[in-house]
Every structure is written in C-alpha cells, then in structure tokens.
Amino acid sequence: MTDPKKLAERFPGDFVFGVATASYQIEGATKADGRKPSIWDAFSNMPGRVHGRHNGDVACDHYHRWEEDLDLIKDMGVSAYRFSIAWPRVIPDGTGRINEKGLDFYDKLIDGLKARGIKTFATLYHWDLPLTLMGEGGWTARSTAYAFQRYAKVVMARLGDRLDAVATFNEPWCSVWLSHLYGQHAPGEKNMDAALHALHYTNLAHGLGIDAIRQVAPQVPAGLVLNAHSVVAGSASEADAAAAERAFEFHNGVFFDPVFKGEYPAAFLAALGERMPEIKDGDMEIIHQKLDWWGLNYYTPMRVSDDPTTGAEFPATVDAPPVSTVKTDIGWEVYAPALKSLVEGLYDRYDLPVCYITENGACYNMEVENGEVDDQPRLDYYAEHLSVVADLIKDGYPMRGYFAWSLMDNFEWAQGYKMRFGLVHVDYDTQVRTIKKSGKWYSELAALFPKGNHKGA
C-alpha cells in the first residue's frame, strides 16, 4: 500500500512521524568552536578503515546550515526530529572543561526546532566518544561510564527544559560488538575481552545516564535506542534453533536483560562470564531502571545457523542465506515480516515500555537527474515497513512513533559517502539538498499528522 492517505488511516492521530540524523554523520565543522577530535575523527583518518578515507570534517555542513535544514524538516511536514549531541563539542576532552560554544549550537538548534513546532528527540551518545578518553581505555574503562554521567548532567541542565524525549545511547550493539569485537567501527578493536569490558561499562553508563537525566530534568521522558536483531534460524533443525537462541542472547539479551530484567543472560554468562570485568555491587540496580520509552532501529533480519567447529566461541553461529532476493545497495536483505516478529518476540520476553521505531530505512544510491531523484525502491521499503508498524498497532502493541533514517544522505560510517540513506539527496560538492521521490511521499504521509483520531495512552 503506497497511497499515503490510505496508509495514514491505519495510524492513530497522535502517532509521531519524524526523521533522524546523528551528529558525526551530518555536522562537519570538526575543529570549529572548541570541538576536539572524537574516536571517529581518528578512525576515519587511518588508511584502510573508511571507504576512500572519507571523514566527517565537512559531511553535510549541518553545523553551518542548520537553519535551512530545519526549514527543510518543517517544509516536509514531519512533526519530530531525532538528532544526537556531540560529546566532543560539549566536553571536548570527555572530562574537565565544559565548552559553552558547543552547548550554544544545540541551544540554537533546539530553539529553532521549537520555533518551527517540531518535537525534539535527543540522543546523548551516537558513537562520537571524545578521543582523549581513549587514553584511559575508552569504553573498556569503568571511568568512561562516570564521565558519561557527568556529560549527561551538563547537557540536561542546559537543554532539558526544551526536550520532548532523550535517549542515553544509540545502538550499543554497534559501539560494543561492531567496534570492539568485529573491528568495523571506531576504535577498530577485534578483541572479545575488550568487547566484554565495553559491554558492561556501556550498560553501566546507560544506567548512570538515566540517573543524571532523572536528577536534572525528571520531566523529560528517558529511554534507550537498541538495534535489536531479528534473529531467524537458518533451518528447522534443533542445532540451528539452539544457535538462534544463543545469537539472541549475544546480540540482544546482553543489552535487554540487564536493562529490563537486571541480569545478564545465563548461557552468555556461562560461556563468557569469567572474561567480563568485575560487576560491582549496585551495578545491576543502576542499569535496571524503569524507562519511559525505548527505541527500536530495524533494517534487515539476522539469519544464523549453528557453527559446528570444535571450540567455536559463543555464540558459535555462522550466517545463513537470505530468504528474500530483494537487497538494498548496501547488500542488506529486505524482509519486512521480520520487523513484526521481532517486536512481538521482544514484548513476549520482556516487560517493555512504549516503543518508537527510531530508525528504519534503506540504502539506494540513485543520483539527481533533471532535478529529481527517482528512488522508488526506497519508497516501497518505507511503505512496506510502515504497513507492518500499522499491523502492530492494530494488534495492540504500544508503537508511538516512527523516525525515517535518514533525513538526508550523510557520512555512512565505514562506508563513507558511498552509501545513501537519505529522504533528501545531498550533493557533497555543492551541499545542495534535493528532496527525493521517497521524501516527497513521506512528506505527504507525515503532513497528515497530528490529526483527530487520538488513541488513549
């Protein structure tokens, strides 16, 4: 169903339609107004880490073009904007001196959103750790969790009065496993022991961050954004079913269980617990605090089979082949039913609060032709996945909003500027923004909200 008016009828009138970005991916201005390097500045500038040695020095130049970008969001008719705050702008060394000019930028940004009637959803950490903290070990050091707590307090004291919602972390799976075990993201570690330390200290930082938010700005709904994996067994065999359960624990449970149950998953601990850092008295209570909301980022399913290799390290799985033949330009399988089964399964396992889809979208690299970008496959992706969200609402799941990833093409981490996820095309040479076909469609849908048929909370 791609008719936006028909699709709109399936959502409650107060459903939030938004767009999302992240600081390092769009801001540029990496040396401006007192900002110091993040781990992504260092990682990007090392040969062989990021496609074409691309970096975030200029990106979409949002730091200088924020007013026109906010006008663009308003013109697109969306009611909310999810953005992240760059820790190296606010506290350039991670600890110590606060940089007022960094806070000034987010002050202006939030005031600009408020003036345009757009809801503000802030993320405190979207991977740009101040590089100075690597001297202490970065996320593998317990001290970083406490540095994050102070940073959260500083941000909320200055900006909390105008935020509609705040998340502590974006996708800790990426900043833990992808960054410390698989080596694909900054700081580029490939070490299970390092990753296990980063896991616990990131979870602890989340809890300390929730503490900070509740102390300083208790009126702001506080949450956490997780890229929960829709783990699907490669076959009906018992071995593959067991592998899928192990994969669930490793990729989802190590974040969901501590936050929503106050413990780490049993099989995970049995396999790797001895290599975890010390879990001090009170840690799990700090991590396990009730959240006001949670965000789900979903793009593609994870299909796994059992790895029969003797001594294979937990979770001992290998990739299983995709079921759908449709793939995006980044090579990810398009399979919307996995989003539905993922949400159903998570609400079945955990006592979860209300949910926002905080990222969902597709990479297609069409360029501008005669002033237009015909990205029909992206439009189809959005329509298909939004239809699934509407089904979940019909089935009684507390889905409160949806943020398209992304507002505009941007720095796609290790893929550099090669991959495009935007509703808006960015010409990186001229910084000209062109709304794509998918962006015009999403705009038509979003502009129909908020409307009259509100559902009770």
Image: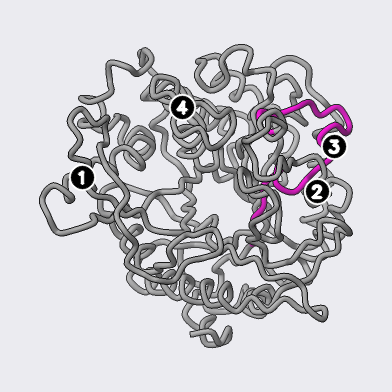
The location of residue 128, given as percent across then percent down, is 65, 34
The location of residue 42, given as percent across then percent down, is 70, 28
| Label 1 element class | strand
Q: Quadrant of residue 359?
A: bottom right
The CA distance from mark 3 to mark 1 is 51 Å
Residue at coordinates 48% horizontally, 49% vertically from top-left? 293
Label 3 or label 1, whichever comes before in sequence order: 3
From the image, state whether disc 3 or disc 1 is nearer to you. Answer: 1
What amino acid is found at the position of numbered circle 2 in the picture? Leu
Foreground pick, 39 / 235:
235
What amino acid is found at the position of numbered circle 3 in the picture? Asp
The CA distance from mark 4 to mark 3 is 37 Å
Label 3 or label 2, whichever comes before in sequence order: 3
Specify few, some or many for label 1: CA neighbours under 10 Å numbering under 14, 14-19, or 20 or more: many
Specify few, some or many for label 3: CA neighbours under 10 Å numbering under 14, 14-19, or 20 or more: some
**Mark 1 lies on residue:** 306
| Label 3 element class | helix
What amino acid is found at the position of numbered circle 1 in the picture? Asp
Foreground pick, 229 / 105:
229
Give the residues in magenta: 19-40
Label 4 or label 3, whichever comes before in sequence order: 3
The location of residue 436, given as percent across then percent down, is 71, 74
Label 1 or label 4, whichever comes before in sequence order: 4
**Mark 4 lies on residue:** 190
Label of residue 317 in the image: none
State left or right for residue 303 relative to residue 216: left
**Mark 2 lies on residue:** 109
Label of residue 104 in the image: 3
